[in-house]
Amino acid sequence: MIALQLTETHEMIRSTAREFAHNVIAPSAVERDQTGEFPHDIVQQLGELGFMGMMVAEEWGGSGLDTVSYVIAMEEISKVDASVGVIMSVNNSLVCWALETFGTSEQKERFLRPLAKGEKLGAFCLSEPGAGSDATQQSTVAVQQNGSWVINGTKNWITNGTTANIYLVFAQTDREKRHKGITCFIVEEGMEGFERGKKEDKMGIRSSDTCSLSFTNVRVPHSTHVLGEVGRGFNIAMEVLNGGRIGIAAQALGIAQGAFEAALKYAKERKAFDRPIADLQAIQFKLAEMSVKIEAARLLTLKAATLKDQHQNIIKAAAEAKLFASKTAVEVALDAIQIHGGYGYVREYLVERFLRDAKITEIYEGTSEIQHIVIAREVLKA
């Protein structure tokens, strides 16, 4: 039995995140969506608030908060701007968590501390041109030479790709062992042979930067830049992504809540047949369905976060949360546009951005199809 009860600390986190989102993020969200400008100042301020390393222990520069706090903050941030939400999510869920869980004390001091404090930004590099949903098919390779590893290959769809300082890069170190021969490396910006591609022109989350990365004889020291054990990279990636899905579920939840609130406000103000359209049963039914879906998504996300805080198996819960929350984000955004009518189809009324931002939550960190496979596998184990 999972007890979902928010504490005073949780409510304080919600209040802080909501105020920051409203006062700092919201004023530039529309312009950044149009221009694709990365929110450097906002990310820096998130770091100062302790939101870039929320779950990292205080001894390593983090806030020492639980996963539920992180989910609450992610929802509030993403409700206003999902681009900022995913920047925050990757740094927290994927990079910081991996370094704290699998890193040495030296790696935590050197890499984790500045990431947790928001002084540096991290990126998680698993996807490749030929390895998306099937992450076992890594073409990027690393060969050991004189106490170092030499990395060659290409990574695709890397969030924070053009702006990050520290990259977790997965490469094949023993092809004969397939996925059991994958290792995780720490690559730093500026290393010789490491190049960042142009920023992708995306449909949504446009002020979050996404790009390809290329590695040409990039040399990293074995003693300091291998994360975890050699050959355990695939296991590290899967463990990290299980937790990362909770962050994306929270992002999707925030998008859905933002779209719902916009639709509710519009329905109360817009008049048709001499009365607010909120008085029309057709609109009321839509709002009711939207509310139910969002609440269900929130509970699934909080359940997964609570299980993670209790150090229980989160594979099924995290996949369920991401699958349902991402589907909810898309459906609620579509309904929000429908409630706005023709106004919902133009950028002036903003709700079309919720739909453009929502769609990616069904794709990254494991597509919805992959989540079905994960859930079914866990169900069949029972």
Image (cartoon, rainbow, N blue to C red):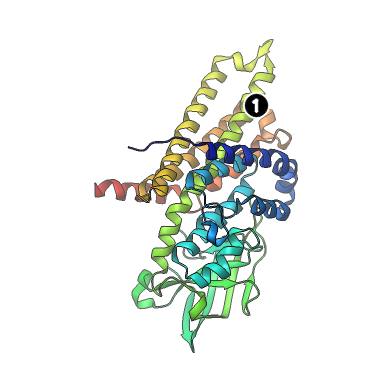
Q: Indicate the position of residue 84 as horizontal and vertical percent values.
A: 64, 49
Depth check, front residue: 361 or 21: 21
Instruction: Tell me the residue at 47%/82% (across/down).
Output: 143
Depth check, front residue: 151 or 167: 167
Residue 203 at least partly seen: no
Identity of the residue furthest to the bottom in this view: 146
Per the image, the residue denoted by label 1 is: 341
Q: Quadrant of residue 28?
A: top right
Image quarter hosting the N terminus: top left
Q: Is residue 3 left or right of residue 207?
A: left
Instruction: Say if 37 sits above or below 348 in the image.
Output: below
Q: SS for tag 1?
A: helix
- The amino acid sitting under disc 1 is Gly
Q: Indicate the position of residue 371 as horizontal and vertical percent values.
A: 40, 48
Instruction: Tell me the residue at 66%/61% (across/down).
Output: 119
Q: Indicate the position of residue 237 as horizontal and vertical percent values.
A: 44, 62
Instruction: Tell me the residue at 59%/52% (across/down).
Output: 88
Q: Quadrant of residue 262?
A: top right
Instruction: Say if 235 sits above or below 268 in the image.
Output: below
